[in-house]
Image: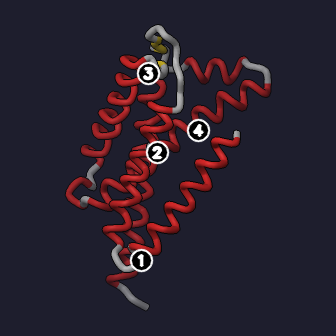
Amino acid sequence: MILDIINIISIICILVCIILLCKNDRKAFLKVVFCVYIALVASVTLVVFRGSPYAQFELDPIASYRRWLTAPPDLARIEALSIILNIAMFVPLGFLVPALWRGLAKIYIILPLSILATLVIEATQLITNRGVFSIEDIIHNTAGGLFGYAIFKIFYRRVSKIKTHPS
């Protein structure tokens, strides 16, 4: 718990510094945010978690939903939070990649990119015994990447309308 609070405070401090350093350069700001995001994902998925000394697989694509529906309320909340966090973890990827590189702002790029990034994390967790190789993580992370892309498209359309039709 204390480590989580320290991480959150650190992230806020880093973002404040980034904003101050890049206040007039949106692209530079987004690149720094992207690098911080990649570092945070790597630390959460590969460094912080200590796994089993044995390789673990979770190949059931609905296992967490089954646990969520059948668990006592406290455990069900933990399962639901795990699903939400796995989705949320990749929303920035789906938003930042097309925001930084407009040529990549296509669903047929973001979809395989989200899958590939998740596979790299899952394979690394499996090889280093730092987590469980989970089909659900691949599904949830990919959904998060697609949600981020949808947010980017909505945001980009609104900004484009404002620029082309100033009031």
The residue under label 2 is: 40
The span from disc 4 to disc 3 (Cα, nearest Å) is 15 Å
Left or right, 65 with respect to 100, comes to right
Residue at point 65% right, 32% down?
A: 80
State the image coordinates of residue 52 (x, y, percent, origin top left): 52, 13
Element type at marker 2?
Answer: helix
Indicate which disc residue 84 carries: 4
- The residue type indicated by label 1 comes to Lys
The span from disc 1 to disc 2 (Cα, nearest Å) is 22 Å
Indicate which disc residue 23 carries: 1
Tell me if mark 1 has few (under 14), some (14-19) or many (20+) residues whose alpha carbon lies within 10 angstroms of its own: few
Marks 4 and 3 close (CB-CB < 8 Å): no
Q: Is residue 40 visible?
A: yes
Answer with the quarter of the image where residue 159 lies.
Answer: bottom left
Image depth: mark 1 or mark 3 in front: 1
The span from disc 1 to disc 3 (Cα, nearest Å) is 40 Å
The span from disc 2 to disc 4 (Cα, nearest Å) is 17 Å
Answer with the quarter of the image where residue 70 lies.
Answer: top right
Tell me if mark 3 has few (under 14), some (14-19) or many (20+) residues whose alpha carbon lies within 10 angstroms of its own: some
Tell me if mark 4 has few (under 14), some (14-19) or many (20+) residues whose alpha carbon lies within 10 angstroms of its own: some
In this rendering, the answer to whether 121 lies above or below 54 is below
- The residue type indicated by label 2 comes to Leu
Marks 2 and 3 close (CB-CB < 8 Å): no
In this rendering, the answer to whether 28 lies above or below 106 is below
Q: Which residue ends up furthest to the bottom in the rendered image?
A: 167
In this rendering, the answer to whether 157 lies above or below 77 is below
